[in-house]
Image (cartoon, grey):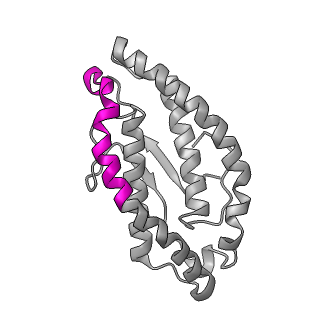
């Protein structure tokens, strides 16, 4: 059975060598914007947990706000990890597809789960930390490969996409509180 939260990043084929070379500089303005917006979104996590716990509600506008911030964040991450060439857009649909269905709190979510989800994800955090180290090494390798060949290695792309997919599932489970289905320990779809 497929996990309800999905991430798909379109493989770019050719990568832009010049923007890849200066990517660390080009990403700074969008990271500043994201940091300012995200600080507000992080405060909503506790509010959503309390709404689910005491009122059994997840206001749709809060959900939409959190999902929009999440989508924007994954566009920035894909751009920063050289997986996409287009500059991250705050509102346009791009080649980073994030799908997180809106939950029916009364039927899909257990009102007490927000109290323990942060503990249940500890094994995921440990494993993802080690995989993140590999992702950083793979991204440096991809950077050199793009500079010399103009292409992001497909196998490395799939690995990094799998890591991002896994981290999105954990994020949707524990922080966005969009599902009670425990995320799989998997890089696959």
Q: Is residue 11 magenta?
A: no
Instruction: Decide whether the magenta segment is chiefly helix, strand or loop.
Output: helix
Q: Count how many numbered circles sit on residues in the image.
A: 0
Dividing the picture into quadrants, the one containing residue 119 is bottom right
- Foreground pick, 35 / 123: 35
Q: In percent of the image, x 66 and y 36: which residue is there? A: 130
Q: Is residue 186 visible?
A: no
Looking at the picture, how far across and down is residue 182, in whole percent? 68, 58
Magenta stretch: residue 29 in it? yes
Task: Decide if residue 65 is on the left or right side of residue 187.
Answer: left
Q: Is residue 2 left or right of residue 122?
A: left
Q: Which residues are magenta?
A: 16-36
User: Which residue is at a point 33% across and 17% down the rendered structure image?
Assistant: 150
Residue nearest the observer in this picture, 131 or 152: 131
Q: Quadrant of residue 145?
A: top left
Note whether 114 is above or below 134 in the view shown. below
Position of the C terminus, as image quadrant, is top right
**Residue 87 x/y as whole percent:** 27, 40
Q: Residue at x 48, y 70 (%)?
A: 43
């Amino acid at each position: 059975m497929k996990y309800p939260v999905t991430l798909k990043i379109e493989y770019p084929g050719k990568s832009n060598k010049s923007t890849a070379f200066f990517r660390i500089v080009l990403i700074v303005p969008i990271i500043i914007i994201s940091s300012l917006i995200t600080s507000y979104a992080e405060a909503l996590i506790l509010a959503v947990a309390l709404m689910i716990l005491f009122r059994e509600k997840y206001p749709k506008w809060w959900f939409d706000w959190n999902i929009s911030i999440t989508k924007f964040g994954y566009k920035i991450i894909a751009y920063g990890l050289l997986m996409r060439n287009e500059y991250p857009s705050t509102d346009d649909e791009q080649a980073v597809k994030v799908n997180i269905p809106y939950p029916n709190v009364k039927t899909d979510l257990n009102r007490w789960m927000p109290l323990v989800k942060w503990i249940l994800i500890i094994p995921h955090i440990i494993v993802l930390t080690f995989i993140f180290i590999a992702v950083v090494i793979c991204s440096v390798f991809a950077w050199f490969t793009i500079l010399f060949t103009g292409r992001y290695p497909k196998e490395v792309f799939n690995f990094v996409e799998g890591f991002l997919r896994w981290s999105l599932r954990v994020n949707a489970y524990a922080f966005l509180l969009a599902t009670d289905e425990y995320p799989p320990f998997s890089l696959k779809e």
